[in-house]
Amino acid sequence: MRVSIFAVELALRVERARQVHEQLLACTQAALPASSLQEKWDFYGGAARVLLANLSLAERGCWDFFEDDARARRDFEMWKGGMTTREGARTSPSGTVDPYRGDARFATFTISMLLVHGSPSERAMAAACAIPDPQLWHRASFHRVLSAISGLSFASVYSDVAYLIPRDFEWALTAEDLAQEKFEYLRPIVG
């Protein structure tokens, strides 16, 4: 069976709205390892709704859609690896935010899915991701691809993963963390 990949990751500024981190954490904690198709739809739809409602807090992000089977499988393993590696981990808590110094704290939320190639859900996601290059990293483009998640049938999702970094707010990422080379794939969001 051939697959395509859809992935999206957002770095949200959470010191302005701590409840966003709490809502995303609640979504991930409520997800069951062996979920039914309806439970997956509920989980991803709920996470997408939180992200859409708080898209104004997203400062950096990326999203991908590729139809090449080999690349899709390889990239999915890379995205999945972000959940089990210490990729986004800090060595110590990020400390208290100093509003007079312009401190910012971030959390990243990642969704990655392998979609059955040619299925209605995969074709719908392909259409949602058909965005001209000059508009790729615009907030409206992130809105468009996140909105498409609620229309997916999870019977067409071969494999999926979602995760929040960090789990604990006290370990939120700083602007200096996001400036590291390992986060260079997260593009500044326009608009």
Image (spheres, grey):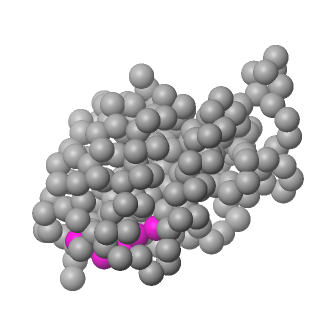
- Would you say residue 104 sits in the magenta stretch? no
The magenta span reads 156-161
Q: Residue furthest top?
A: 100
The location of residue 93, given as percent across then percent down, is 84, 49
The location of residue 35, given as percent across then percent down, is 41, 76
The location of residue 187, given as percent across then percent down, is 50, 38
Q: Please say whether residue 73 is visible from this viewpoint.
A: no
Quadrant that contains the C terminus: top left
- Would you say residue 159 sits in the magenta stretch? yes
Q: Is residue 153 left or right of residue 82?
A: left
Q: Quadrant of residue 95?
A: top right
Q: Please say whether residue 30 is visible from this viewpoint.
A: yes
Q: Nearer the viewer, residue 131 or 124?
A: 124
Residue at left offset 46%, top offset 67%: 161
Residue at left offset 63%, top offset 33%: 17
Residue at left offset 33%, top offset 63%: 41
Q: Is residue 173 above or below residue 139?
A: below
The location of residue 88, given as percent across then percent down, is 68, 56
Q: Quadrant of residue 111?
A: bottom left
Q: Is residue 177 left or right of residue 20?
A: right
> Which SS does the magenta portion mostly show?
strand
Quadrant that contains the N terminus: bottom left
Q: Quadrant of residue 124?
A: bottom left
Q: Nearer the viewer, residue 180 or 143?
A: 143
Residue at left offset 24%, top offset 36%: 132
| Count of number-bearing discs | 0
Q: Is residue 130 above or below residue 175?
A: below
